[in-house]
Image (tube, rainbow, N blue to C red):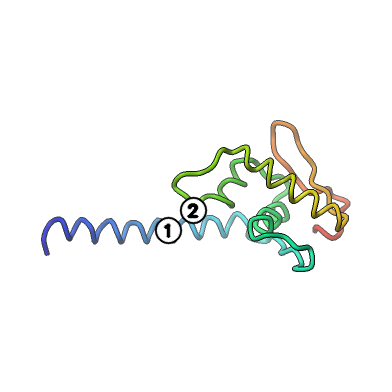
Amino acid sequence: MAVEDMEKHRLRVENETLREQVRQLKQQLVEGGKNAPLSWGLTDRERRLYAHLTSRELVTRESCMAVMYGHMLAQPDPKIIDVWLCKLRRKLAQQGVEIVTHWGVGWSLARNDSRAA
């Protein structure tokens, strides 16, 4: 095996290992989170964001970015989380679930939302 082929093989193995680590870390971020019922009509990303919100007392912009875009090398502007939260808020409000903003810190689900917990 040529040196170049060995390097390609090493990089492939390293890439697979890193992808698996990212998958496991993303799973830990939403571990314990609840899935929204299909009847709520959430998109895949909205469902991920909802599961993340239900898995923590408080979520940060950084943790939301990791859950939603951690697999991408070139990530969008972090302000995209505000867009997703706006869309999700609208859909969750129809179900009686409220997302609370903790200015400068992050977001949480309102504690009195029995459907969210």
Quadrant where the C terminus lies?
bottom right
Name the kind of residue labelled 1 in the image. Answer: Arg
Q: Which residue is mark 2?
A: 71
Residue at image position (58%, 51%) is 68
Estimate the x, y position of residue 108 in percent, counting from the top left.
75, 46
Residue at image position (47%, 55%) is 22
Asked whether the beta carbons under mark 2 and mark 1 sit within 8 Å of each other, the answer is: yes
Estimate the x, y position of residue 49 in percent, counting from the top left.
67, 53
Name the kind of residue labelled 2 in the image. Answer: His
Q: Which residue is mark 1?
A: 19
Rendered image quadrant of residue 15: bottom left
Residue at image position (50%, 59%) is 23
95 to 89, vertically: above or below: below
Rendered image quadrant of residue 63: top right
Of the numbered discs 2 and 1, the one sitting upstream in the chain is 1
Left or right, 46 with respect to 27, comes to: right
Crowding at mark 1 (Cα within 10 Å: few <14, some 14-19, many 20+): few
